[in-house]
Image (cartoon, rainbow, N blue to C red):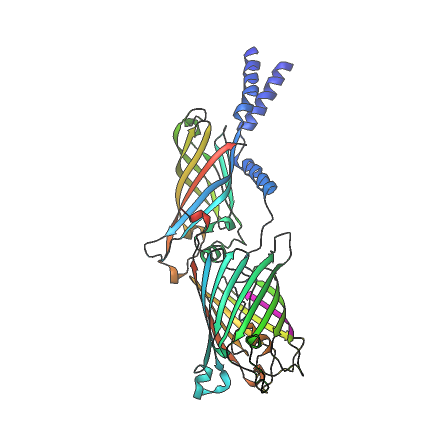
Amino acid sequence: MKKIILAAAILAIASPSFAQKLMSRTAKISFNATTPKSPEKIEGVNNEVACILDAKTGDFVFQLQVKSFKFERELMQQHFNENYMESDKFPKSMFKGKITNFGDVNLAKDGTYKVTVSGDLTVHGVTKTVSVPGTITVKGGTATASAKLQIKLADYKVDVPSVVGDKVAKDAIITIDAALAQK
Amino acid sequence: MRKFLLASALICGTTLSFAQSADSLMNELDNDVKATAKKEDVEFTFKATRICNTSSVENLGEGVLDFRVNHRFGRLNQGAENFYGLDNATTKLGLDYGIKKWLMVGVEHSTLNKENDVFVKAKLLKQQKNGMPITLSYYGSISAVRKSTLPIPAGTEWHFSNQLAYINQVLIARKMSNAISLQLTPTLVHYNLVDSSKYSNNTIALGIGGRVKLSRRVAITAEYYLRLTNQDMPVIGSTGKTYNSATVGIDVETGGHVFQLMLSNSFTNTERVIIGQTGDSWKDGGIHFGFNISRVFTVVKPKEFRN
């Protein structure tokens, strides 16, 4: 009986320190859909991604406004929003998932940890389950999460008209970088 | 027993928070995003910086240069002999530049009357979701024609100031829905040289324009200028009657460019001519086919792409 109480007490006391959440409102997601035949780089950057990592469970979510993607060419930004992502209709992209091997990560110890992130990625109103490799780098009490994934535009019903069929990649490469800080 | 209950309650509480799902984490993020979000601007009211002939509330991005070639052909009613007007054309070349996201300038040359103009367009209010209901811009230009288009009395001098006209427009637009945008354009054109015994130097007009998107890449556009003064002023230098300008067009986006094709009773597309000096009428078949081609260049890269 005493042991139970002790255990409970330890859990109760310990949980606030583990219950912390790490977040960022300025995480970066970029995508690249350039092909060798593209007349210019098809590359967008969004520096206003919001994300939270639950440092206890490894649950990880992010969301972004599609309109916040910046392009080197303004006209491309307009076409990205108006013609491909239809950002009026589908203003947000998001991810809801979990670091499946979060047990391997020690946020209290400097190092680079290989992780696998699995969950539901919603782009252009279509949700698909993805599982991607990534890293969490802990250094001096800060954690940086990075991952790279490739998504098939057709899977997310992003139409590429046939005239530019060979100038836009069928698969876009997406990179995420999030410097996480305590919420 | 009481202690046991307490312990269980504590354990349960902790276990629940352990089991916190990604869903509730997303709700937390949603709330945070909502709490820190700024009011969202409504973008892309029109596809291009011109509705058809005259300005829309759209601006070029910061550091973007736009080289424009606008052709307007002769009247369709010139018949097969003149290839329905295509044998006869006026051209306007223009260079527009976006200094800031809200401020653009341009220089233009039109072959009709050898007209040159410089303009500035500034976006003063921006339509927002759940906020500001309209976008409001100012457009101002100064135009000079190189040729004497109005005979001057003997013994008087042809001053440079005689060549000038000033155009002032307030562009008030609202994106009503994803497909429909409307714009009202109160306009004042001041012609320095008119037959002032009969007409005012100031032509006041109300422009009405809009677009309806048919698909993601194709839109129908229209523009009309209703003159409130000087309706009976003839084409300067002739006795030809003038009409209100009416234009219908189509915006077609083909990958990298927006092509604007249109039919109008205005022969050229400078504000000076369109608003007060349109000399043809739709009713008589005085309709001109025209198109705008635009090629944009990024002169100054956005800060995200500077290394």
Above or below, comparing residue A120 to residue A101 in the picture: below
Residue B275 in which image quadrant: bottom right
Say how many tags the image has: 0
Residue A123 visible, this angle:
yes
In the displayed orientation, state which residue is furthest to the front: B155
Say whether residue A143 is left or right of residue B248: left
From this viewpoint, which residue is outermost toward the top?
A2
Q: Residue furthest bottom?
A: B81
Q: Which of the 4 image quadrants contains residue B227? A: bottom right
Q: Is residue B181 above or below residue B307?
A: below
Q: Position of residue B192 (x, y in %)?
A: 60, 75
Q: Is B101 situated above or below B165?
A: above
Q: Main secondary structure of the magenta part?
A: strand
Residue that lies at the very extreme toward the left in this rendered image: A36
Residue closest to the eye, A19 or A29: A29
**B298 or B110: which is nearer to us?**
B110
Residue at image location 54% in from the left, 84% down from the top: B285
Report the span colored magenta: B203-212
Residue B233 placement (x, y as % from top left):
63, 82
- Is residue A178 one of those drawn in magenta? no
Please, is residue B86 above or below residue A81 in the view?
A: below
Front-most of A15 and B173?
B173
Q: Is residue A125 visible?
A: no
The percent coordinates of residue A76 (x first, y second) are 45, 56
> Which residue appears at 58% of the width and 58% of the height?
B123
- Asked whether residue B211 is drawn in magenta, I would say yes
Q: Quadrant of the N terminus of chain B?
A: top right
Q: Position of residue B300 (x, y in %)?
A: 44, 54
Residue for point 51% across, 48% down: A68
